[in-house]
Image: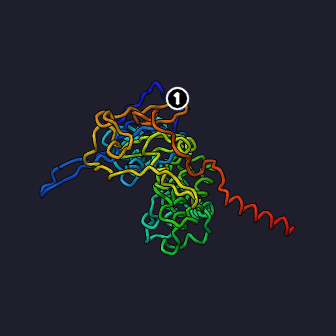
Amino acid sequence: MNPVRADLAPPAAQPLLQVRDLVKHFPVRNGLFGRIGGQVHAVDGVSFDLAPGETLALVGESGCGKSTVGRLLLRLIEPTAGTVLFEGENIFARSETSMRSLRRRLQIIFQDPYGSLNPRMTVGQMLEEPLALHALVAPARRSARVSELLELVGLAAEHARRYPHEFSGGQRQRIAIARALAVEPALIVADEPVSALDVSIQAQVINLLQELQRRFGLALVFVSHDLAVVKHIAGRVGVMYLGQIVELAETERLFAEPRHPYTRALLSAIPVPDPTRGRDRPVLQGDVPSPLAPPPGCRFHTRCPYAQERCRVEAPVTEIDETGHQVACHFWCTLPAAEALPGTATKRHPALAKLQAAFLDKETAAQ
């Protein structure tokens, strides 16, 4: 767990969501009698705030705990320790009965749209179900409300009579978004919502989410491993490694000035659309340690090219500057400057400039 230097934390407006020291350990049972033989440290000491209408992205390698954090925020699983305050109230202190009324304010969009839709129900029945469960719309108005929801996500009213298998992957994800919007939530956790879709469909779904967020003031926790998508949609990005947030900052600042060595390695893996441009990519050595036995000290020290003896024995304190940029690294101030990353201003290649000039000359001559 990385302690936070509270004296460096910037003042902030009242957040919609406050996560403090969130921990989730899954027991590993062995033998005939199912005795607990260990703990999987899926999430270890995650803390952050989320403002109304904000998008926070959680990124990292598979198994880093980002999806588990998303489920903990909605109390789909119970935590080992920590608190999640939604509008100032600890959701883990609520009874199961009182949680039902709160769930209409907290929704999720799953990665697999087909797996999250009931194949035995029509789209209309699936969208009417939450309206009836929370008594949001009178029975006589539900059919009209379903049509409104479908049109909101770019589908036609007649699609309400179809079953999930009759739609494409992108259309199914739109239906999942419509179902989440049906109960008028304040927070949506989007767990890899576009990773199973084609690139062109990804763009459509991302643009739809952004438009709906602007229209309804939704707060989004966007879980993804696709940094290009994250850069497009998120206002802030949290980078996770072995159950901990190692860096958190505004998206533009994180991409322009990554401070943690792991963040730099992730960003260096983004393809550059210029075959003539070489890059000095930091290649991480070794494998991710097992969450059954996380290494002592800084959890990244086993793969970090800048690790020193202090990193092996002492967990880094999470430092926060005046801009809200957080980083958990002992030596981030002394690391060499990061290379310019994709999307930052770079000089055009001479051959490309010459080719563009030739096309412009042809267009001028044609006129």
- Give the answer, above or below, for where 107 lies relative to 154: above
Question: In this rendering, does residue 89 appear at all?
Answer: no
Q: Position of residue 179 (x, y in %)?
A: 51, 59
- Give the answer, above or below, for where 168 lies relative to 58: below
Q: Residue farthest to the bottom?
A: 166
285 left or right, relative to 30? right
Q: Position of residue 205 (x, y in %)?
A: 57, 60
Amino acid carrying label 1: it is Pro
Quarter where residue 150 is shown: bottom right
Q: Position of residue 225 (x, y in %)?
A: 46, 54
Q: How many labels sit on residues?
A: 1
- Which residue is drawn at the image coordinates 70% and 58% (left, top)? 353
- Which residue is drawn at the image coordinates 72% and 61% (left, top)? 356
Q: Position of residue 91 (x, y in %)?
A: 40, 41
In front here: 227 or 42? 227
Circle 1 is placed at which residue position?
A: 10
Q: Is the residue marked by circle 1 packed among few (<14), some (14-19), or many (20+) residues within 10 Å?
A: few
In front here: 347 or 205? 347
In front here: 317 or 211? 317
Q: Residue farthest to the left?
A: 32
- Which residue is drawn at the image coordinates 62% and 69% (left, top)? 156
As helix, strand or loop, the secondary structure at mark 1 comes to loop
Quarter where residue 323 is shown: top right
Question: In this rendering, does residue 4 appear at all?
Answer: yes
State which quarter of the image contains the N terminus: top left
- Give the answer, above or below, for where 15 lies relative to 97: above
